[in-house]
Image (cartoon, rainbow, N blue to C red):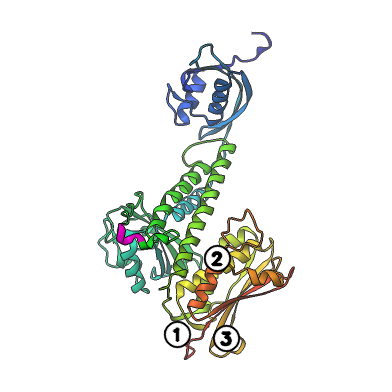
Amino acid sequence: MSGGLPAPLRAISDGADMLVSADKAIAALQLRCGGELPGTIAVPALLEVVRKARRYGLKLARTIQAQDGASAITAWVEVEPLPGTDAGCEILLRNWHATPLAAEDPAEIDERRGEIDRHVAELTARLDAGQRVLTVEAEAPDLVALAAAMEAGFGRPWTDFITIAGNSHSQPLHWRLLDGADVEVPGSSRRWRASLFPQAGPGREPAGFELCLVSPELPALPPEPDAKGSAVRHRLLGRDVAPVLRQPIARIIANAETIHSRLAGPISDDYANYAADIASAGQHLLALIEDLTDLEVVEADDFSTAPDRIDLADVARQAAGILGVRAREKRIALDAPRPGESLPAVAEFRRVLQVLINLVTNAIRYSPEDSQVWIRLEDSIDAGPGRVRVVVCDQGPGLSEADQGRIFEKFERLGRSGDGGSGLGLYISRRLARAMGGELSVESASGQGARFILDLPAAPDGSQN
């Protein structure tokens, strides 16, 4: 052969884009990418070229990229349709180059798997350093009883409320032994797995944990309402419907994240980025479902909160801890109340935490990189008799006087687009504040940042239980 060029690698596909024969290197790549021989072409970039060539009846040629788990492969592909109505294509690969892939950081893999668990979790709870329950959120029908029991037992270890498969110990195990453990939930016939995410503390030991319960099985669909139940059809989503919507979307997100992180096998960067776009869109849709569900709750005629004596400083520190990673990604410094600071109030812990997470999230979202977000406390001297307050301040673009009057309206986004917000967060937060006997307001000026102020009733005796 003149010029000393290597012979091209050759393969044949049929009219259904299945690889029916191939040279050894192409066949090996097909198998390493999870395909079979014969079988549908398993290299996404190659499959795309073959489909287009067959569909349009044209010879196509271009560079493709692939990964087989060990190497990144580039090659020049030429695809020519074979004669015949239902015929396939002849595939030639030239200039085949394989470059070994760098080993992935195990910590990054664990972090991505953790994010997937968070997306598909049907119960989430905040635990203190002793694995005692602080807050719990769950809406799946078969988790309602568990959530109610955990709410009634705040301060007890979460392991008191479930059964750990294969464990006979009466005392809580070390969190590393519980992370990934199979658990049984009273009242649920589904299989469950627990994931524990430690929250950073001042020393080596975690200051607390985020608990997620994940099931590989979808919840049962709610029964169709009969004529007597027709009165509830005006609900926007319905407390029974929301979990059923949430789980398929969460699984779409999880699968897209798995593809994007290449945990399911090697793919090109283009397809990985496409999977990331799917995951992002799913996350926006999931956030909208959460907001619409909260909207239905706070607008219900019978909505009320469960006031208790809480420490605003502790709630603020927890909100800052939950959002610490998001802030660091934008190089934003979160300045929360120091350990030892305390400000007693009368309110519902999880609702105050919900409001503060919303306020701090907004502050991070609309603040520039390398800026700062403060969470400040003010007692009755500054807030007024019988009141205490927590203030979230940022260095963002600020709000005009007109915008300050509109920002708490339902679905108001002040002309923003592309940030995934629903325009409901501040509306819901103000409803929650007022339901607890408080108020949520804003002080700002264009170009000077914003101060969101949550006022709440002070504890009558200035102490907490």
- Does dot 2 land on a helix, a strand or a loop? helix
Q: Which of 414 and 144 is in front in this view?
A: 414
- Answer few, some or many: residues within 10 Å of disc 1's Cα (few below 14, many 20 plus, some between 14 and 19): some
Q: Residue at x 60, y 90 (%)?
A: 381
* Among numbered discs 1 and 3, the one appearing first in the sequence: 3
Could you tell me residue 30's position as x and y percent? 48, 26
* Among numbered discs 3 and 2, the one appearing first in the sequence: 3
Residue at image mark 3: 379
Place residue 361 in its image quadrant: bottom right
Magenta highlight on residue 330: no
Q: How far apart are marks 1 and 2 (CA)?
A: 29 Å
Q: Do the residues labelled 3 and 2 touch (CB within 8 Å)?
A: no
Q: Do the residues labelled 1 and 3 touch (CB within 8 Å)?
A: no
Is residue 173 found left or right of 59 in the rendered image?
A: left
Q: How far apart are marks 1 and 3 (CA)?
A: 14 Å
Tag shown at residue 425: 2
Q: Nearer the viewer, residue 173 or 46?
A: 46
Could you tell me residue 58's position as x and y percent? 61, 18
Could you tell me residue 67's position as x and y percent? 54, 33
Is residue 146 found left or right of 198 in the rendered image?
A: left
What residue occupies the far front of the structure in this picture? 227
Judge whether 116 appears above or below 462 on screen: above
Judge whether 405 appears above or below 117 on screen: below
Could you tell me residue 455's position as x and y percent? 56, 80
Judge whether 257 appears above or below 22 on screen: below
Q: Residue at x 30, y 57 (%)?
A: 226
Tag shown at residue 464: 1
Q: Which SS type dominates the magenta stretch?
A: helix
Where does the magenta region start and end?
A: 226-230
The amino acid type of the residue labelled 3 equals Asp
- Answer few, some or many: residues within 10 Å of disc 2's Cα (few below 14, many 20 plus, some between 14 and 19): many
